[in-house]
Amino acid sequence: MIKNIALIFATEREASPFLSVLKNKKITKTPYAEFYEGNFINKKIIIAVSGVGKIKAALTTNALKEKFFINYIINIGYAGLLNKDITEKGGILIAIDAVQYDFDLSAVDNCPVGYQQDVDSVFLACDTNVIKLMKKSNFDVAFGRVASGDKFLSDKHDSDSLRSTFNADVCDMELASILFVSKLNQISVSSIKIISDVVGNEDNYYNTGNIIKKAIDITVFLLNNLD
């Protein structure tokens, strides 16, 4: 049974709409992240703001396990769109899996880019139960693959490369790292990605206001159905 749940955001901006709903906040600050304990729709959870990038996300994920005994994580945050076929899906993508596209040992180990021996895989899977739950729901969302790396992508060449190499649908800077640490720590993970822009098209940014409200509704739905 799921008991201890955390939401991970990279930035205060992403977390702010959710923190405004959190009641009875207790804040723990560390050199790398901030942790807010409180009640979200009558459920005791932790909201973690990790900072941007894979290293900070990994540190935060490990701390959630060791300091707060978390056994379920929902990662929520902005992502750049790579697959334009999903633009009409309400601005939200539920992650099926993720890959660290900038983790490359192929020159020495003769393995695919993104392959990690610790988990024996290129692609790190999200919680399949949540994916099934969301597919049965009435929410208009897309489902797909996230490519994670420590680089803000804005070039069409990058977008085309991630599509052709990994068949990725969106990109971010945290999810694959969260999944990697969680897999080692036996933590289940699901992820709600808010599409903010189209990679390679500087003029195509989404109005994320309504999308964030929808992400909150999805989070409430998941919290009510996870356990």
Image: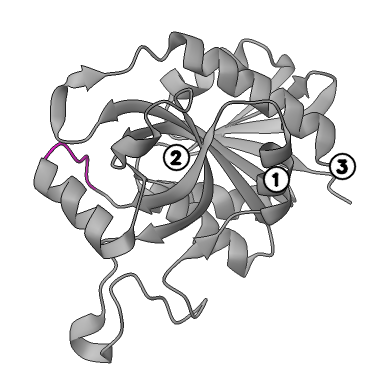
Image check: 196 left or right of 165?
right
Front-lying residue, 21 or 29? 21
**Chain-order first, disc 1 or disc 2:** 2
* Residue hosting label 2: 31
Q: Is residue 29 visible?
A: no
Instruction: Answer above or below: position of 33 versus 110.
Output: above
Pick the quarter of the image with the C terminus. Answer: top right
Q: CA distance from mark 3 to mark 2?
A: 32 Å
Numbered badge on residue 227:
3
Q: Amino acid at mark 2?
A: Pro
Q: Nearer the viewer, mark 1 or mark 3?
A: 1
Q: Position of residue 208 (x, y in %)?
A: 41, 15
Residue toward you, 68 or 120: 120
Residue labelled with disc 1: 130
Q: CA distance from mark 1 to mark 2?
A: 32 Å
Kindly report which numbered mark, 3 or 2, lies closer to the viewer in this rendering.
Answer: 3
- Asked if the residue under mark 2 is in contact with the one under mark 3, i.e. CB atoms within 8 Å, the reply is no
Report the span colored magenta.
151-155
For the residue labelled by badge 1, is the local secondary structure a helix, a strand or a loop?
helix
Kindly identify the residue that appears in the image at 63 percent across and 50 percent down.
Answer: 189
- Viewer-nearest residue: 95 or 37: 95
Pointer 1 or 3: first along the chain: 1
